[in-house]
Image (tube, rainbow, N blue to C red):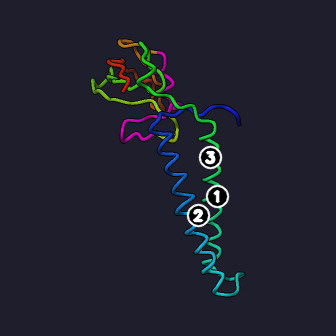
Amino acid sequence: MSRTVPMTRVGYVALKNELDRLKKEDRPHVVKQIEEARAHGDLSENAEYDAAKERQGFIETKITEIEDKLARAEVIDPSEHRSERVVFGATMVLEDLDSGETSRYQIVGEDEADIKNGKINVHSPLARAAIGKETGEEVVLQAPGGARSYEVLEILFD
């Protein structure tokens, strides 16, 4: 895969920190666990050894995935990309046209998405429906329960 991975500066730093933790803390810890399990003797029936080796495989896979994402990262600073339209990194304030409730979402990369904190994946149905819309325009989201309509009340670039 050679396509870029869009992310905000905050998301990039968080991934970098996770990579550092995996390399400097988790990897050495699991190596120590493997060494300790080896000291117990017969590896063919050693559950501690098997679990540690499985954890090591998980850590190494995660390291490879993060290194790949960081290498392909396209860091986008929302404050530098002011626009009249909803774009990656923008925070949008939406009004549900059925209930009148307002909600606020920032469109971020997939590793940054956290719906509880108002951050949605750029590839989510809501983000895809909203990208390109201007303040005052309607966003129609095709949801499993039927179409939902929102109005873009505000577009912010923090």
Residue at image position (72%, 81%) is 44
Write down the residue under mark 3: 67
Q: Which residues are magenta?
A: 113-132
Mark 2 to mark 3 CA distance (whole Å):
15 Å
Q: Nearer the viewer, residue 155 or 103?
A: 155
Secondary structure beneath label 1: helix
- Position of 143 compared to 31: left or right? left
Where is residue 70 drawn, in percent x and y?
A: 59, 41
- Position of 154 compared to 8: left or right? left
Asked if labels 2 and 1 touch by Cβ distance under 8 angstroms, the answer is yes
Mark 1 to mark 2 CA distance (whole Å):
8 Å
Disc nearer the start of the sequence (1/3): 1
**Residue 60, label in figure:** 1
Residue at image position (48%, 25%) is 88
Where is residue 130 drawn, in percent x and y?
A: 45, 21
Which amino acid type corresponds to the residue marked 1 in the rendered image? Glu
- In this rendering, is residue 56 above or below 13? below
Mark 1 to mark 3 CA distance (whole Å):
11 Å
Write down the residue under mark 2: 27
Q: Nearer the viewer, residue 36 or 130?
A: 36
Disc nearer the start of the sequence (2/3): 2
Foreground mark, 1 or 2, reads 2
**How packed is label 1: few (under 14 Cα within 10 Å), some, or many (20 or more)?**
some
Which amino acid type corresponds to the residue marked 3 in the rendered image? Glu
- In this rendering, is residue 29 above or below 41? above
Where is residue 128 drawn, in percent x and y?
A: 51, 25
